[in-house]
Image (spheres, rainbow, N blue to C red):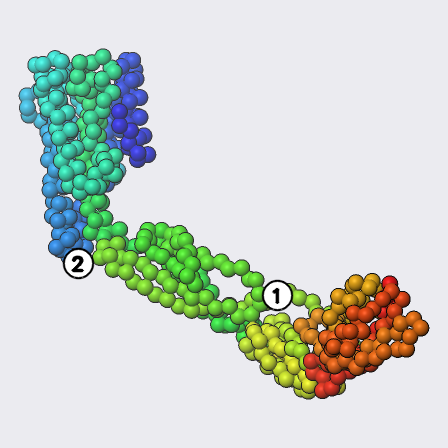
Amino acid sequence: MSIPKEPRQLMINIMYLVLTAMLALNVSAEIFNAFKLVDKSLQKSNDILDQANANIPAEVARLAKKDMKRLGKYAERTGPVMDLSKTFSDTIDSYILKLSDSNGDGVLDDQDYVMKADKETGEMVRKDLKNKKNFDITTRLMIGKDITGKTGPAADLKNMIEAYQTKFMSFIDEEDRPAYASKISMKVDDAWESSGKPSWAQFNFGHMPVQAVLPMLTKMKNDAKSSETAVLNYLMGKVGGEDIVFNKFRVVSAPKKSYVIKGEKFETELFLSASSDKIKGMSVNVDGRSIPVKDGVANYTANATSTGVKKYNVNISITNPVTGEVTREKGTFEYEVGERSVNVAATKMNVFYIGVENPVSVTAAGISSNALKVNGSGVVLKKGGASGYTVTASRPGEASITVSGGGLETTKFPFRVKRIPDPVARLSKNSGGTMGNGEFKAQGGVGAFLDNFDFDAKCKIQGYILTKLAPRQDPIESNNAGARYNDKSSRLVKSAKPGDTYYFDNVKAKCPGDSAGRKINSMVFKIK
């Protein structure tokens, strides 16, 4: 048994089944008025379908003109579809007129079930039916001489419904028919097969009162008109009747500036953005990454992992559902990332070191980095990013960084310029003390190390005086240039024995930014 999907149609079907069941139980005559109410509701539904369907063929013809070679065939089908529905409806009307003939003489008079104007609404409705409880008329007219109902008018009507179902489907392209099979309402109800009745005709018309049969016939007309609507809407869709209708709206604000300073004016463009939940074939790409589209809108998100001005490139393409033409648009946009921050600076620690690149970050809350002007005094300032700079200095003393622009009052930040701290001379990890004979001989020279200095800087040993003092022997010196041992120094180190003492004096190192070497720590090692 087919079940309609439309809530209104489902409600009408259920009402009809309930009323039929109550009628079988010999319920009072008020039930006949309920059948009349269902019939009236179905008539109204049919009128609404007729009004809606009447406008579709002209619209299909208009849309097909843009490509008659490909779309003209769909416009040509609208007329035959409507003729098919009308032919079926006319056949049903002929049955209704015959059943309304109270005398059975083939002549409808004022007592018969004919149309009249409703006093309140002016709508054309049927008069009250004189023969509404008559069981014989339906059997005689719809079943005929074959009491089984396997032949006769009702059997012919069943065959007609099945044939018209196929005819309506024939107007739909073969590849689309599976999806539209459920939308064609013209179907023969198979509930009679479990009823014990010999045929569909007997189940629906055998010994049924006229008033109960009329809504069923009107519903058959409704099925034909609903099928007509489904096919016409299909044809509309094939010629582009599903053109995008913008039904999603939102208010958009596009400010000219992301930052506004106190005293300035905030200025933005306000407009209504429209999209559609029918949009298909639309793709959005941001910096090479595909963004999902829902109801014609793509939501782009990006993690703000660093501060500064960020740009992103957008490419949007949309395919015309009718012509297949692809339209592409692109644009470049930007936003600026700031950060919540608190800056605590110890005044005496504001230092730039000579010989290295000193990193400096300059930001001002509420001001775009592009609007800031940064200048250095006593140092060389180089921009290295949206808010980053590097400072290089050449001589000790005082220096300053001045920041202005973007409505900011000119502000000077003082700094001290100093040499890189003295490195520490060491053999391996030791700068003096006792050392094993083997470990001492394994060293190849003296190194200079910048302990706890956060800059990437290296100092070089320029030279030193190595002195060996052995027990009960005179001291032996070697004047060593550079960090590594020279030949004499190497011989002195290799001759080390437990109890010997080695002195590294007058150690000099040169660090980045130094014009000359500097004297650093001496070392004394006792060999064990």
Q: Give whichever of 409, 6 is nearer the camera.
A: 409
**Residue at x-position 79% and y-position 63%:** 438
**Side of 35 where 80 appears, left or right:** left
Instruction: Note whether residue 414 is visible.
Output: no
**Side of 317 where 212 appears, left or right:** left
Q: Give whichever of 513, 402 is nearer the camera.
A: 513
Q: Work out whether mark 1 precedes mark 2 in sequence or the reverse, and give the earlier one.
A: 2
Identify the mark at residue 66; answer none if there is no mark: 2
What amino acid type is highlighted by mark number 2? Lys
Using the numbered discs, state the Cα–Cα distance from disc 1 to disc 2 in whole angstroms.
Answer: 55 Å
**Side of 453 where 46 appears, left or right:** left
SS type, badge 2: helix
For the N terminus, give its image quadrant.
Answer: top left
Q: Position of residue 20 (x, y in %)?
A: 27, 19
Category of crowding for the residue at label 1, using alpha-carbon neighbours closer than 10 angstroms: few (below 14), some (14–19), many (at least 20): few
Residue 412 in which image quadrant: bottom right
